């Protein structure tokens, strides 16, 4: 992917249009500065309309047209949805819900990830495409399937059951070890034969929590196996072409920490939630998570929207300037490709109201003018490609903890994993510092502060790494329900105090979850909700205590000097202001400063810095309602003008300053 440019483009679906439109598309792509498009994602039924009958003439024409226009192809292997003939011939390959009902064709991803017959046919069409377009001048990347597992990750059919048993045998080696891990002595669930084990189908009451967790682990791996098999075939035929697929990192189903090493380039899809007033902060979180998946390297934004999407309850259009601002936010946090779904708005189908680079209104439109503007800006910013960001703060994010914490049979249905993840991230974002979202396998020594929100599953290894990090002078912030259970969901020897007990300086005796809608007052005049714990101090200091509720006088927030470092513990769901206050104290104690002094800027100014061999680039994005006046000197690549010491940035605008060296 290394090249002195930022990729700019979209999903291109020419099969939805008459050939007379294609020449217009190529000309408009040149006008907008598009240099990369994803092609053929949902084209299996067009390429193989009947079993073994192939029609490549239209795709040949498209690929040749792209090459002539100087636009490269991120060519899909077309396996995102099998053709209708496949489902008619192989109904057992359709996915099954936990209650035993089938999901029928008519949408997309109408297949079981573990289906051998699906994999056989998917590899066959993959080989045909790879052999035909190997060496084509437009081919720059391979796009495997599309948002794998987005709709069908969990399948409970007999094929999945057989594959699940094989996975369990590989994981545990023996039924004795599986029975121990699953705690099958509870409710008399001990297994005596592998064939007795099923996926966690619908049951009379609470199912086995570890069985459910293992099934999610297996399902993530089953989807990854689809990618691996198709990738390996593409690599066999075209070893020189990079291969990726588009991840959806703000979705629950797949553990992308295990996926990331398998992709040549991390590529993600992201769409703003229209009902989220802090949507730009959630965007930054996903971008930082994407960079974390990439190990700090540049990554691709494979899809976002020029304006409204089609699938939310209220599909709110983006205001003037918002699309450009969103795009530059992703670049500010490491993206070297800005792409959309899709190139031309569809006239039919389930997504006909989804925005596109070429909207239904055509080129005399707000969207098209902003698309052209963005293309010009990204062209000027080509030198930013391949630069990276440095972060002093690591925020631990864990899909397995997300799965397990929100399963049934927990003390409170109101506890939500992303609630604390986003709350702590937002507090860090508002301090103006750069965060890297990392897995629990992280080595904290490269950071100054590690933030651990509700890391429900944690083993002794991460606890030891955090203890050593803090003891050597680092800082940590830990919230409730962190390190509570091991990888098998067993509560460990420290009891409810969890794996981080040593460095917290507190002991948790009992949980006191709150009633729905209940709030408790704290002695700093703030409010807490959802969750409280009976905490005993074992060396830590109480920063905040409860004034009322079930635990008056009991610590709610503590701070502990552990070795040369400091750990803060939040034993309740603090309100936004209190979370912010604790994080500001942690950031200050850790000696972390933002890229520029934030006293010079109003609330809502986002600041990052990318740097590399080509130079240093200061990104300034004003999400606030006041003009920002910041100290900067160099060349603003957005406005294409010099900046001589002070830059005034209007609300809703962005600047990317190539900073003067020295």
Image (cartoon, rainbow, N blue to C red):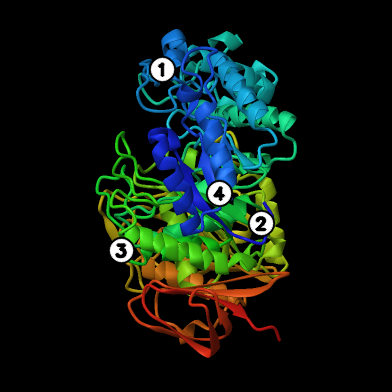
Give residue 35's position: percent from left, percent from top. 56, 53
Sequence-wise, which precedes: disc 4 or disc 2? 4
Residue at the bottom extreme?
645
Query: Mark 1 near mark 2, Cβ–Cβ under 8 Å?
Result: no
Disc 4 to disc 2, how far (Cα)?
30 Å
In which quarter of the view is residue 632 placed?
bottom right
Sequence-wise, which precedes: disc 3 or disc 2? 2
Indicate whether 221 appears above or below 429.
Answer: above
Q: Name the residue under label 1.
A: 84
Sequence-wise, which precedes: disc 4 or disc 1? 4
Q: Name the residue under label 2.
A: 297
Disc 1 to disc 2, how far (Cα)?
40 Å
Disc 3 to disc 4, how far (Cα)?
31 Å
Give residue 52's position: percent from left, percent from top. 55, 12
Q: Name the residue under label 4.
A: 69
Mark toward the viewer: 4 or 2: 4
Query: Mark 4 near mark 2, Cβ–Cβ under 8 Å?
Result: no
Element at badge 2?
Answer: loop
**Viewer-proximal residue, 225 or 383?**
383
Mark toward the viewer: 4 or 1: 4
Sequence-wise, which precedes: disc 3 or disc 4? 4
Query: Mark 1 near mark 3, Cβ–Cβ under 8 Å?
Result: no
Element at badge 4?
Answer: helix
Mark toward the viewer: 3 or 4: 4
């Amino acid at each position: 992917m290394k090249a002195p440019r930022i990729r700019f483009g979209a999903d291109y679906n020419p099969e939805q249009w008459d050939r007379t439109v294609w020449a217009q598309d190529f000309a408009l792509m040149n006008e907008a500065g598009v240099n990369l498009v994803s092609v053929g994602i949902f084209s299996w039924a067009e390429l193989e309309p009947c079993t073994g009958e192939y029609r490549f003439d239209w795709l040949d024409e498209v690929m040749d047209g792209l090459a002539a226009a100087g636009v490269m192809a991120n060519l899909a292997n077309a396996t995102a949805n099998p053709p209708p003939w496949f489902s008619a011939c192989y109904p057992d390959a359709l996915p099954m819900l936990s209650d035993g009902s089938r999901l029928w064709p008519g949408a997309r991803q109408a297949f079981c990830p573990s289906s051998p017959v699906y994999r056989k046919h998917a590899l066959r069409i993959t080989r045909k495409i790879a052999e035909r377009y190997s060496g084509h001048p437009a081919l720059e990347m391979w796009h495997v399937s599309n948002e794998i597992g987005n709709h069908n990750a969990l399948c409970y059919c007999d094929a999945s059951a057989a594959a699940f048993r094989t996975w369990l045998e590989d994981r545990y080696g023996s039924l004795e070890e599986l029975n121990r891990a699953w705690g099958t002595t509870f409710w008399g669930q001990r297994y005596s034969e592998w064939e007795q084990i099923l996926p966690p189908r619908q049951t009379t009451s609470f199912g086995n929590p570890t069985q459910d967790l293992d099934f999610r682990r297996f399902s993530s791996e089953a989807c990854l196996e689809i990618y691996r098999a198709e990738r390996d075939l593409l690599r066999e035929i075209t070893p020189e072409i990079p291969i990726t697929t588009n991840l959806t990192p703000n979705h629950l189903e797949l553990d992308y920490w295990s996926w990331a090493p398998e992709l040549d380039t991390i590529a993600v899809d992201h769409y703003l939630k229209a009902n989220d007033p802090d949507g730009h902060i959630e965007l930054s979180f996903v971008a930082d998570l994407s960079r974390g998946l990439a190990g700090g390297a540049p990554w691709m934004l494979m899809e976002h929207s020029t304006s409204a999407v089609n699938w939310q309850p209220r599909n709110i259009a983006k205001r003037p300037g918002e699309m450009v601002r969103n795009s530059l936010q992703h670049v500010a946090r490491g993206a070297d490709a800005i792409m959309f779904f899709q190139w031309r708005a569809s006239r039919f189908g389930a997504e006909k109201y989804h925005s596109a680079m070429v909207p239904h209104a055509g080129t005399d439109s707000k969207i098209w003018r902003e698309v052209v503007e963005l293309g010009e800006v990204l062209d000027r910013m080509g030198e930013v490609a391949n630069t990276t960001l440095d972060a002093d703060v690591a925020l631990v994010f864990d899909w397995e903890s997300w799965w397990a914490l929100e399963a049934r049979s927990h003390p409170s249905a109101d506890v939500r994993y992303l609630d604390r993840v986003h709350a702590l991230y937002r507090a860090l974002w508002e301090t103006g510092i750069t965060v890297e979202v990392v897995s629990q396998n992280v080595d904290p020594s490269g950071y100054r502060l590690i933030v651990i929100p509700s890391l429900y599953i944690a083993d002794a290894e991460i606890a030891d790494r955090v203890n050593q990090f803090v003891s050597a002078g680092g800082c940590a912030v830990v919230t409730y329900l962190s390190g509570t259970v091991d990888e098998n969901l067993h509560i460990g020897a420290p009891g409810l105090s969890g794996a981080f007990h040593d460095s917290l300086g507190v002991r948790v005796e009992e949980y006191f979850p709150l009633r729905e809608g209940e709030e408790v007052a704290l002695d700093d005049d703030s409010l807490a909700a959802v969750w409280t714990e009976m905490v005993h101090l074992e060396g830590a200091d109480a920063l905040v205590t409860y004034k009322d509720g079930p635990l008056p006088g009991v610590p709610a927030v503590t701070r502990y000097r552990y070795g040369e470092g400091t750990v803060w513990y939040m034993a309740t769901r603090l309100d936004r202001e209190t979370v912010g206050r604790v994080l500001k104290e942690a950031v200050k104690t850790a000696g972390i400063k933002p890229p520029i002094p934030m006293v010079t800027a109003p609330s809502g100014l986002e600041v990052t810095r990318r740097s590399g061999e080509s130079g240093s680039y200061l990104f300034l994005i004003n999400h606030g309602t006041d003009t920002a006046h910041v100290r900067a000197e160099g060349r603003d690549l957005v406005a294409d003008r010099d900046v001589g010491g002070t830059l005034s940035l209007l609300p809703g605008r962005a600047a990317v300053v190539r900073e003067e060296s020295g």
